[in-house]
Amino acid sequence: MFVADWCGFCDNPISPTEQNEGNYTMLQSSNCFHNTHRKCLRDAILSKRAQDGHLSCPSCKAGIQDHELKQYVRDFEWKEVENYFTKQLIESCPNLFQCDCGNVIEFIEGQVDLGQKDEKGQLLTKEAAEHMA
């Protein structure tokens, strides 16, 4: 006997055909194990995850880990999702900016500490200390 599961994203049942063809997935990293259509999850990753920086199970609101979400999009799509979220974050927080090295940094005005050392115990160059200030 078939027991219908519902996709929390589209609120439609997951049919026996969809189950047989593998067009659904069970959320694992959220530990809720709710089922969802693969396409609906993918669409949510490309929209909601990109917008909010996280994605939760629509049925119980448990957080879905990024390592699971990455399985449903291509590498270049995940990079676009991350870049879009980073851009949104930087635009919404005036003290944040993206450094040339790619890191997102919160700017808090301070003084340059020329006595800073790197992980090997060597003094930082003036340029590196200014970068860290």
Image (spheres, rainbow, N blue to C red):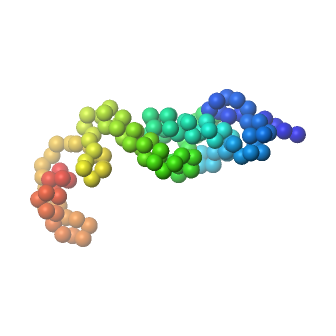
Q: In this view, does 94 lie to the left or right of 80?
A: left
What residue is drawn where x is 77% and y is 36%?
Answer: 15
| Farthest residue, direction top | 11
Task: Indicate the position of residue 11 as horizontal and vertical percent values.
Answer: 67, 28
| Number of dots carrying numbers | 0
115 lies above or below 88:
below
Whether residue 75 is visible:
yes
Q: Image quarter for residue 83?
A: top left
94 lies above or below 127:
above
What residue is drawn where x is 74% and y is 40%?
Answer: 18
Q: Image quarter for residue 56?
A: top right
| Farthest residue, direction right | 1
Q: In this view, does 11 lie to the left or right of 113?
A: right
What residue is drawn where x is 73% and y is 32%?
Answer: 13
Whether residue 56 is visible:
no
What residue is drawn where x is 30% and y is 50%?
Answer: 102
Give the quarter of the figure containing the N terminus.
Answer: top right
113 lies above or below 20:
below
Task: Indicate the position of residue 19 as horizontal and vertical percent values.
Answer: 75, 43
Front residue of this view, candidates 34 and 12: 12
Task: Indicate the position of residue 32 as horizontal and vertical percent values.
Answer: 65, 43
Task: Indicate the position of residue 10 as horizontal and vertical percent values.
Answer: 64, 30
Q: Is residue 133 left or right of residue 102?
A: left
